[in-house]
Image (cartoon, coloured by chain):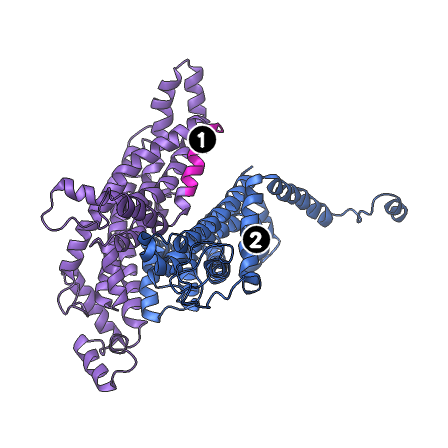
Amino acid sequence: MIESSSELGPPTPVPGVETAITHAALRRQQPAWRLMLRKPTFIVGALILLFWIFCAVFGETIAPHNPLAQQLLAVNVAPSRAHLFGTDQLGRDVFSRVITGSRSILLIAAAATVLGTLLGTALGLLMGYLGGVLDILVGRVVEAVLALPIVIVAFLFIVALGPSAPTLIVVIGLVFTPLIARTVRSAVLVESQLDYLSSARLLGEKPPQIMFTEILPNVLPVILVEFTVRLGYAIFAVATLSFLGFGIQPPTPDWGSDIAANYGVLPAGYWWETLFPALAIASLIVGINLVTDSIEQVLAS
Amino acid sequence: MTGAWPSAIVPGGVLATYILRRLGLALVTLWLLSVIVFFAGQVLPGDPGRAILGPLAAQSAVHALDQSLGVDRPLLTQYWTWITGLLHGDMGLSYEFRTPVAPFIGAALVNSIKLGALAFIIVVPLSILGGVVAALNYGRAPDRIISVTGLSATTVPEFVSGIVVLVIFGVELKWFPVSASAGPGASFGSQLYHLILPVIPLVLVLFGYIARMARAGTIEALESDYARTATLKGLKRSVVIRRHVLRNSLLPTITVIATQTGYLIGGLVVVETLFNYQGIGRLIFTAANSKDFPMLEAGVLTIGVVYMVATLIADILYTTLNPRLRPGGSG
């Protein structure tokens, strides 16, 4: 009887406790994605972000010129059809450098944010669920890290270790770790009050299992928001550090260091060498903020 | 990002106990900070002599320099000398100038405080007003305009907005000087005049965040039960807003403003470098460039202390002003 009914009706699996739960979860999740796609701010932000990711991946292929090629007979050329964004002081094509410049900043910022999110989530789960001495100790470290702006901490460590992409990633990632841990911790504390955790405990689940299979899925939205917020900060930090000469090093195409190299000739009227990399940074950060805002709004509703 | 962590768990006892506890925690944090700074400045570089002299210097010269800097001693001894020195106001000798670090830090800090204070004096009323106006017009045009402007202003890094104002108002229009330093013995007015351009990027970055917080706080207070009760009681809207909404919504903003000191100082590095202003940010920048570790460490630690004092004051202010947390207050 059961088999025939399932053949007649839509292909629903045999009703059981587990499938009922996944269905409920799906019903809760699907509208969140749909709501997001219906938001114009999310679409615009995501498109900007996708555009820069595309440039980061295929930069060399789509750039009309070699971003490193110097033409000493065509320096400081104003934007034209041959050079859409003009050329810089060394005669390099600004358009090609803006396109390919997305790679270094996106890679470093994303890697640092992923590192910080992974470590921060693990730490936050431990702090929130286990509490005790660890919680107090890490709490102090968070306060200590909070007392210093990222750029300052990065200075200290980059001077000590020398500027390189791995150093930037590790330093920014480690600065983010306690900050993300703090957010995850408070989300875990909220979850700890709920009934499903005491039932899991009564069922004999071990703390690691409870932390990673029970609590973690429920605090994922918080982690997602935190990730996008931090990504924005990471891009801000990498761009600023590169501008100050402590980030991505020339001649690698990079927005921050290109602005630093060329803003000296702004008074001479060569505005395009500074304006276009600056617009690139601003657009990327605006894109991320739009996405973050939409995610926050949808999750809050 | 709202408030320092422990402020959420205010002990229900006397205010003095709370302040003492908060002070104790700040001291622990400060000690941790000193360990981090010491680790980064004196342990990570490995061999400071090598770092200063470069890879081509003779090993004997590196040894001699290490010895004269005292960095060949055991780490614990070095830390002890450093931290006890700090407690006596001795920040060590600059690698670059071979003179005590402390006077440099002191002078730079005074300059930075002038710039930072001016930024706060401008941005705090402006952003609170913006946030409250946006909240009172929730969802309508003024709200959209203020929110989007704030978001855009916050997202543009200081070095971008700094270059823009520098070129437009300093180089092209020549309305303001391109250097923020008014020179020794300059009058208050002249100093203020020199600080107008550099303060703009700082104001832009801070505006969005504080306005956003003020807006969120006001919206929450507007939708609260007590605001509704006050309205239903027949109070005028202006009275409800002034007496019930703003008092509650602006309190958390105090804490937010304090946490912004950190971002402000981060921005100072860029702005002071760009406008050639002898503040703590530029000091750290030059120390980092010349690998002057004692100067760098002292500068970073000073910033940490300034931030902690700011949040401490904000926390105490918050606790004192909040009737629900006031000892003996019945809410």
**For the residue labelled by badge 1, is the local secondary structure a helix, a strand or a loop?**
helix
Chain name for mark 2:
A
Nearest the eye: A28 or B179: B179
Q: Residue at label 2?
A: A50
As shown in the figure, which amino acid type bears the numbered disc 1? Asp
Q: Which residue lies furthest to the top in this view?
A: B234
Magenta extent: B139-152
Q: Which amino acid does label 2 sit on?
A: Leu
Rendered position, B12 above or below A85: above
Q: Looking at the rendering, which quadrant does residue B238 occupy?
A: top left
Magenta stretch: helix, strand or loop mostly? helix
Image spot of residue B262 (x, y percent): 31, 50
Q: Where is residue B101 in the image (x, y as percent from the top left)?
A: 16, 63
- The one of A247 and B256 positioned closer to us in this rendering: A247
**Looking at the image, which residue sits at the far left?**
B185
What letter labels the chain drawn in blue?
Answer: A
Q: Residue at coordinates 49% horizontally, 29% vertically from top-left?
A: B139
Which hue is chain B drawn in?
purple
Which quarter of the rendered picture does the C terminus of chain A lie within? top right
Residue A266: image location, x then y, percent: 33, 53
